Amino acid sequence: LVMRHRTPQFSHVFSSDGYSAGYYSYLWSVVLAADAFSAFTEAGGPYDKAVAARLRQHVFTVGNTVDPAAGYRAFRGRDPKIDALMKERGFPMPAAAKAAPAAKSPNAKRK
């Protein structure tokens, strides 16, 4: 007998060459957004003018004229960390990382 329908199955998200790199890039952008937002919460709130000026100066206005990693380092003073995203998504953090109150970034899912 010839089957008329395919058996129920799915391919893994990383099984093809095209989507896996794009998915990683998307997830990395969420890490950067959460870490950048934590710069504002560390400074006292999302409307801190000094942090906004650094973000504008080192990331937004330079565009791709400087290496994006170097621009982010100039803004944040360090390489990006995943800690803010982990807190945002509810993963346990070491005691030292829990010292600062967790804040919702613009990427947090709404309930």
Image (cartoon, grey):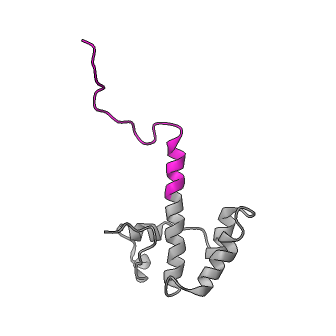
Prevailing SS of the magenta stretch:
loop
The magenta stretch spans residue 21: yes
33 sits to left or right of 103: right
The magenta stretch spans residue 28: no
The boundaries of the magenta stretch are 1-27
Q: Count up the numbered dots.
A: 0
List x then y, in percent, for residue 55. Answer: 63, 76
Residue shown at 49% from the left, 63% from the top: 30
Residue shown at 40% from the left, 82% from the top: 101
The reply to whether residue 103 is visible in this rendering is yes
Residue shown at 31% from the left, 33% from the top: 9
Quarter location, residue 8: top left
The reply to whether residue 77 is visible in this rendering is no
List x then y, in percent, for residue 2. Answer: 27, 14
Q: Is residue 16 above or below residue 111?
A: above
Q: Name the foreground residue: 3 vs 104.
A: 3
Residue found farthest to the front: 4
Residue shown at 65% from the left, 76% from the top: 56
Q: Is residue 39 above or below residue 17?
A: below
List x then y, in percent, for residue 32. Answer: 54, 66
* Quarter containing the N terminus: top left
97 sits to left or right of 3: right
